[in-house]
Image: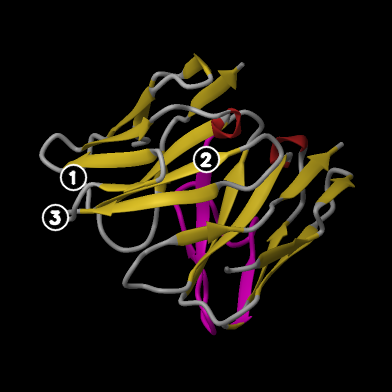
C-alpha cells in the first residue's frame, strides 16, 4: 500500500520564525496537496504542489506565507513563514497515485504549535 | 462552500447501524469518504463517481445522488473500530477536494 511520510511529526516554534515541513512518498505520484486542519475542525486545502512549477494556492492562502516546493515526483515541502499563534494547526500532505481513480491518501501530519 | 454533514455526532452500541449524510450546494463529480481517528491521518474509505455505482466493502457502503448533490455513508453492524470522525470530501471535477464539516462517531460496548 502507499506510504507517505512527513517530517517533523510535531514542533513547537516561536512566533516570527519559519518551519519547513517535508513530505516524502514511496513511489512517483501524479499529484500532491497540502492541507491544514485546526484542532477539532475539518481539513482545508492550502495548495496543490506542482512538480517543477509554482504551487496553485486556494483562496485565503498566499505564497509568501506558505511557500511550497516540489522538486520531483516523490517529494514536497511546505514552509510556514513568519509564524503567529494562529498558525498552530496540523499540516497534512496528500497524494494521488492514479489520476483515473482519484483516490487521495494522506500523510500522518505535522502538529505545529506556535508560542 | 463547505459540504454539510449530518449528524454532527452519533453514539452507537456495538452492532447498531448508522447513516452519515453529506450535502453540497454545488454540483458534484465525485465524493470521497474518510475516517480519522484522534491524532491520526484521515484514512481513505471509498470514492463515488458521477454516474458510477453504489460502493461498498465489508459492512461499510455509500451512495451518491448526483441530482440532489448528496452522498450517504452506511455503517452496518458497527464495531468498536468504527469509532472516529468521518469526513466527506467533494469535487466538482478535477482532483481538489472540499471537505465536509465532519461527523463524530463513537461505538460503545
- The quarter in which the C terminus of chain A is drawn is top right
Q: Tag 3, which secondary structure?
A: loop
What separation in Å lies between label 1 and label 2 (alpha carbons)? 23 Å
Residue A28 lies in the magenta stretch: no
Residue B51 is marked as 3
Q: Which chain hosts label 2?
A: B
Q: Which chain hosts label 3?
A: B
What separation in Å lies between label 3 and label 2 (alpha carbons)? 24 Å
Q: Which residues are magenta?
A: A42-71
Residue at image x 89%, y 44%? A14
- Answer yes or no: are tags 3 and 1 on the same subunit: yes
Q: Tag 1, which secondary structure?
A: loop
Relative placement, left or right, of A23 versus A103 is: right
- Answer yes or no: are tags 3 and 2 on the same subunit: yes
Position above or below: B105 against B81:
above
Task: Indicate the position of residue A15 as horizontal and vertical percent values.
Answer: 84, 43
**Mark 2 = which residue?**
B35
Asked if the residues shown at circle 3 and circle 1 are in contact, with their CB atoms under 8 angstroms apart, the answer is: no
Residue at image x 51%, y 77%? A29
| Quadrant housing residue B5 | top left
Q: Nearer the viewer, mark 1 or mark 2?
A: 2
- The quarter in which the N terminus of chain A is drawn is bottom right
Relative placement, left or right, of B92 versus B8 is: left
Position above or below: A69 against A46:
below
Relative placement, left or right, of B96 versus A4 is: left
Q: How many residues crowd around disc 1 within 10 Å: few (fewer than 14), some, or many (20 or more)? A: some
Task: Indicate the position of residue A85 as horizontal and vertical percent values.
Answer: 77, 36
Asked if the residues shown at circle 3 and circle 2 are in contact, with their CB atoms under 8 angstroms apart, the answer is: no
Depth check, front residue: B6 or B75: B75
Q: Which numbered disc flags the more N-terminal residue, 1 or 2? A: 1
Position above or below: B4 against A111:
above
**Mark 1 = which residue?**
B27
Amino acid at each position: 500500500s502507499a506510504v507517505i511520510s512527513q517530517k517533523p511529526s510535531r514542533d513547537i516554534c516561536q512566533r516570527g520564525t519559519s518551519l519547513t515541513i517535508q513530505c516524502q512518498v514511496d513511489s512517483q505520484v501524479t499529484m500532491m496537496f497540502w492541507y491544514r486542519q485546526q484542532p477539532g475542525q475539518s481539513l482545508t486545502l492550502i495548495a496543490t504542489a506542482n512538480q517543477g512549477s509554482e504551487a496553485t494556492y486556494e483562496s485565503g492562502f498566499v505564497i509568501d506565507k506558505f511557500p511550497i516546493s516540489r522538486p520531483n515526483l516523490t517529494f514536497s515541502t511546505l514552509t510556514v513563514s513568519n509564524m503567529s499563534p494562529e498558525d498552530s494547526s496540523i499540516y497534512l500532505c496528500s497524494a494521488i497515485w492514479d489520476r483515473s481513480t482519484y483516490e487521495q491518501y494522506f500523510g500522518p501530519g505535522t502538529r505545529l504549535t506556535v508560542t | 462552500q463547505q459540504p454539510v454533514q449530518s449528524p454532527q455526532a452519533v453514539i452507537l452500541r456495538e452492532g447498531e447501524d448508522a447513516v452519515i449524510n453529506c450535502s453540497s450546494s454545488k454540483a458534484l463529480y465525485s465524493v470521497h469518504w474518510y475516517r480519522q481517528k484522534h491524532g491520526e491521518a484521515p484514512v481513505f474509505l471509498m470514492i463515488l463517481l458521477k454516474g458510477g455505482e453504489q460502493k461498498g466493502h465489508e459492512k461499510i457502503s455509500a451512495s451518491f445522488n448526483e441530482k440532489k448533490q448528496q452522498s450517504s455513508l452506511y455503517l452496518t453492524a458497527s464495531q468498536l473500530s468504527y469509532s472516529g470522525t468521518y469526513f466527506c470530501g467533494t469535487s466538482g471535477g478535477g482532483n481538489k477536494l472540499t471537505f465536509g464539516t465532519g461527523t463524530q462517531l463513537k461505538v460503545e460496548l
